[in-house]
Image (cartoon, rainbow, N blue to C red):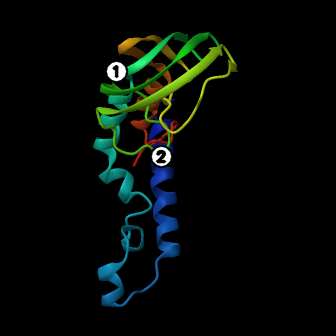
Amino acid sequence: MKHTAVYVLAAVLLCGATAEAETARPQSSEQRQVAPPQAMGMTGFVRPIISYIPNRLFDLLDIVRLRVRVGPGLSAGVRATEFADVFAGRHSTVYAGLRGSRGRGWGFPWPFGIEDHGGVEVSVVDLASDGPFAPVVDPLELGFEVQAGLVGIYPALEVYEMLDLITGFLFLDIRGDDF
């Protein structure tokens, strides 16, 4: 069983190298100077190795959400996974702190941002707004949030992000948020 991870890692590296060799084409020196990293061999197993440490660091930061919010609103919520959560209210705020789950395609996890969220949610019945500034929520999140007038807080523990960190050590990105 303990050798399985080594075999999986070797297979991933071998598949990446094979795919890279099949797609490589000879290029002139002019094309090579302006070609994107993917055309210069930054695909396959090279990119995951180069970005390994930054991705694990960002996966570690994704585990905790601790936002301090400033802006108008009145809202409250508690979450013990996607199937046991309650939220009601509306707020439009800026925040600072640990952002928590980045989700797919969010890029660099800046420690500040905008959060705009409102509506009602009870378990899987979700009538809350999910616009571009709604928080990305881990389906296994444990936490609460409160916005009272101009100040608010949102602490949470992102359990699925813990699994993403653990599998990330084996080059498996189950959350789809690696660079």
Q: Decide if residue 73 is on the left or right side of residue 34.
A: right
Q: Is residue 138 something one can see in this rendering? A: no
> Label 1 amino acid?
Arg
> Splitting the image into 4 quarters, where does residue 44 fall?
bottom left
Q: Is residue 88 something one can see in this rendering? A: yes
- The residue lying at 42 percent from left, 15 percent from top is 156
Nearer the N terminus, badge 2 or badge 1? Answer: 1
- The residue lying at 44 percent from left, 17 percent from top is 73
> Label 2 amino acid?
Gly
Instruction: Please rate how many residues cluster around mark 2, counting C-alpha atoms within 10 Å: few if below 14, some from 14 to 19, many from 20.
Output: few
Q: Estimate the x, y position of residue 21 in percent, counting from the top left.
A: 47, 72
SS state under label 2: loop
Residue holding disc 1: 69
Q: Does 20 appear above or below 79?
A: below
- Pick the residue in front: 12 or 158: 158
Residue holding disc 2: 105
Q: Does 5 appear above or below 118?
A: below
- The residue lying at 47 percent from left, 19 percent from top is 159
Tell which residue pokes out farthest to the right in this image: 125
Q: Estimate the x, y position of residue 118 in percent, counting from the top left.
A: 55, 22
SS state under label 1: strand
**Residue 61 numbered mark, or none:** none
